[in-house]
Image: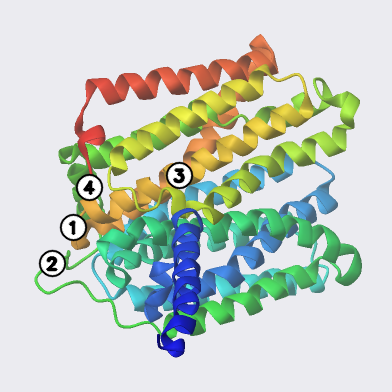
Amino acid sequence: MDTSESSSEPQTAAADEVKRTRRGRRRWAMDTRPLRRPAYRRLWSSTIVTAVGSQLTAVAVPKQIYDITGSSAWVGAASLAGLLPLIVFALWGGAIADSMDRRKLLLITNSGIAVTSVLFWLQAVTGLDSVAVLMVLLAVQQAFWGLNAPARNASIARLVPEEELAAANALGSTVMQTGQVVGPLLAGVLIPVIGLPELYLIDALALCVTVWAVYRLPSLPPLAGTGPRRAGVREIAAGFRYISLHKVLLLSFLADIIAMVFGMPRALFPQLASQTYAPYGEGLALGLLFAAIPIGAVVGGLFSGTFSRARRHGWMVIGAVVAWGAAITGFGLSGSLWLAVGFLALAGVADMVSMVFRGAILLSAATDEMRGRMQGVFTVVVAGGPRLADVLHGSAGSAFGARTAVAGGGILVVAVMLSLALAVPALRRYRV
């Protein structure tokens, strides 16, 4: 017997075992196939930096307004000041993204956001202390972001193949959710050390990295013979008509509206922290409630290999929204803070699954000449839904009590989503 052959058999068996282990790990770990595409990798890498940087500004603006006025009402007014420009320019930005090179639009808008961050820094470092200036800068920043988001999201379908869209959305969403956890914590640590103005400057520097990454992307003009030649009201209206004619797109938007409007209870977190979970410490309870959903979403993203290869995208959206509603119901019924945080974390996992497949449906079910406008509407829905939920839950919490309002909202999510799925089969039939 050849001893060299016999000695190689254990090595081959060991190598096979390593390969099987790696394959098993890929079944549940984050699906990183899109990162093999250099262009997508550049776009995604820039998101890592800006996800944290943007949250520094998101913390700094309300903190500075509160320091100037001592009024939470002014903080709320500033939030509304940024909402209208976001809605208007997201819809218009979607039409622009369908009519010009998306790479060029990303360069312009990211540069605009960076300049706005520098202006935020200048007004803070000079001690201007003007709420009006802050609100104007916030409105301008949100307008640029509204123009940027549709082009950025619509570009993904040109950078990765269709079967990797869900994985690409999982990668991007995980980074953004991580930023929502890390950014505010980092801001809280940095403000006493370096001061509030420098948070704006860090965000501006981070955006320079984004501009460089976008500059290295390939050109992304409208495909030959497609896309509108201009971006006006008529083109925006054409986008809404397109949604009305494609039920799966309409249902994907409705699924998010149902989940967010009926089932996003963040407006009741302060009341719950003060009343239901006060024995645990009001500050601790409030921080945990706000952090739980993003943390759950990050965990869902890290284990997105368990679901990102699914082909029945419609059923994944339906299941995720129902799971979100069930988790929110459990949260509303929880008298224990830790049980409540656990249910919110489960809701965050469900939200990540929903985001991944709703995003994939919008990119795969729409033609390229309409993707920008679909992403514009998506941006408006994502921004507007939670704000409507704040009004609804705040009113319901005052009328019926916080826990009753939360649990009732979760039950409504489950009932309405299942009824919609049964009544209109387009979503549950959709698959890649």
Question: What is the crowding at mark 4: few (fewer than 14 residues within 10 Å), some, or many (at least 20)?
Answer: some
The residue beneath circle 1 is 367
Q: Say which residue appears at 59% left-offset and 17% top-offset.
A: 407
Mark 2–mark 4 distance (CA, rounded to whole Å): 17 Å
Q: How many marks?
A: 4
Q: Earlier in the sequence, mark 1 or mark 4?
A: 4
Q: For numbered disc 1, what is the local secondary structure?
A: loop
Is the C-beta separation of discs 1 and 4 under 8 Å? no
Is the C-beta separation of discs 4 and 3 under 8 Å? no
Mark 1–mark 3 distance (CA, rounded to whole Å): 23 Å
Residue found at the very far front of the displayed protein:
1
Could you tell me residue 198's position as x and y percent?
Answer: 78, 72
Q: Say which residue appears at 20% left-offset and 28% top-offset.
A: 425
Question: Going by the image, does 186 lie left or right of 222?
Answer: right
Camera-side mark, 1 or 3:
3
Q: Earlier in the sequence, mark 2 or mark 4?
A: 2
The residue beneath circle 3 is 353
Could you tell me residue 376's position as x and y percent?
Answer: 36, 53
Q: For numbered disc 4, what is the local secondary structure?
A: helix
Camera-side mark, 4 or 3:
3
Camera-side mark, 1 or 2:
1
> What numbered label is drawn on residue 226?
2
Q: Nearer the viewer, residue 186 or 165?
A: 165
The residue beneath circle 4 is 237
Q: Earlier in the sequence, mark 4 or mark 3?
A: 4
Q: Say which residue appears at 73% left-offset and 51% top-offset.
A: 62
Is the C-beta separation of discs 1 and 2 under 8 Å? yes
Camera-side mark, 2 or 4:
2
